[in-house]
Image (spheres, rainbow, N blue to C red):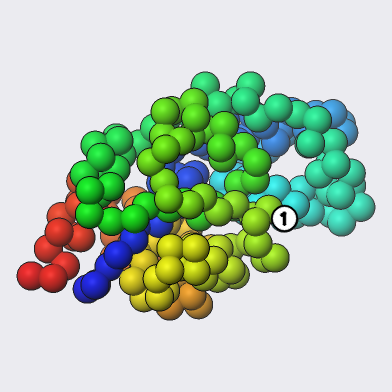
Amino acid sequence: MKNIKAVVFDCDGVMFDSQSANLAFYNSILSHFGVAPVTQDQPENVALCHTAASPQVFRGLLGPELGAAAMDYSRQVDYCDFIPQLQIEAGLVELLDVLAQRFSLAVATNRGNSMGDILDYFSLGGVFATVLTYVDVEKPKPAPDMLLTVAQRLHLLPHQLVFVGDSELDRQAAQDAGCCFVSYKWDGGLRIDHHGELLELLLNADD
């Protein structure tokens, strides 16, 4: 992991513990359609709500037709009501303060329009050079589109990015884009369990 010029973060599960907020958001929409909520004893559905873009979530939970209707209705639901349930990951703010002095920073997330509101809520709006969500690209993760677009926007080559993610979608996107990948609290590659460990990796990369 040498010659890294930019650090790209996934949002959910990496920057924030957002599982409770996401389930509350999706379950509020399922309730509108009379569908039973996603619960913790449904790990595949919980993972879907945690990692996939909203169109894929609704399609996976409800099928194509009802999923499309749920996606349309979701645009009337303000995710800002759920943002206070997010918990910022330990050490993230301190990490960003240090990294910003040496690297370009970016976000690549399967979230949609809520990402800007989240960054503003946590006073991180001015930290990142670019923020990519699923609405900015043709295909969400696991497609490499977001990471390739981040590289283009930062005028870098993909191998100059390190992407920090926590799911197979993230790992596959990084692999197909040609980026370095660091796995956060997940056994999907070079694993770290605290953001301070990422700093050590990056600062020692050229030693």
Q: Is residue 143 above or below residue 114?
A: below
Q: How many marks?
A: 1
**Residue 117 position within the rendered picture, expressed as x and y whole percent measured from the top left:** 57, 32
* Residue at the spot of label 1: 56
| Residue nearest the observer in this picture, 112 or 14 | 112
**Residue 3 position within the rendered picture, expressed as x and y whole percent measured from the top left:** 24, 72
Locate residue 185 relative to residue 77 in the image: left or right. Answer: left
Residue 162: image quadrant is: bottom left
The N terminus appears in which quarter of the rendering? bottom left
Q: Residue at x 63, y 21 (%)?
A: 81
| Residue nearest the observer in this picture, 56 or 133 | 133
Most extreme residue toward the right is 65
Most extreme residue toward the front is 155
**Residue 139 position within the rendered picture, expressed as x and y whole percent measured from the top left:** 67, 65
Q: Residue at x 62, y 25 (%)?
A: 80
Please indicate, yes or no, whether residue 134 appears anywhere in the rendered image: yes
Q: Amino acid at mark 1?
A: Gln
Locate residue 144 relative to residue 71 in the image: left or right. Answer: left
| Residue nearest the observer in this picture, 34 or 8 | 8
**Residue 135 position within the rendered picture, expressed as x and y whole percent measured from the top left:** 68, 53
Q: Residue at x 29, y 43 (%)?
A: 96
Residue 160: image quadrant is: bottom left
Please indicate, yes or no, whether residue 168 appears anywhere in the rendered image: no
Q: Callout 1 environment at 10 Å: few (<14), some (14 to 19), or many (20+)?
A: many
Q: Secondary structure at mark 1?
A: helix
Q: Is residue 168 above or below residue 15?
A: below
The C terminus appears in which quarter of the rendering? bottom left
Residue 29: image quadrant is: top right
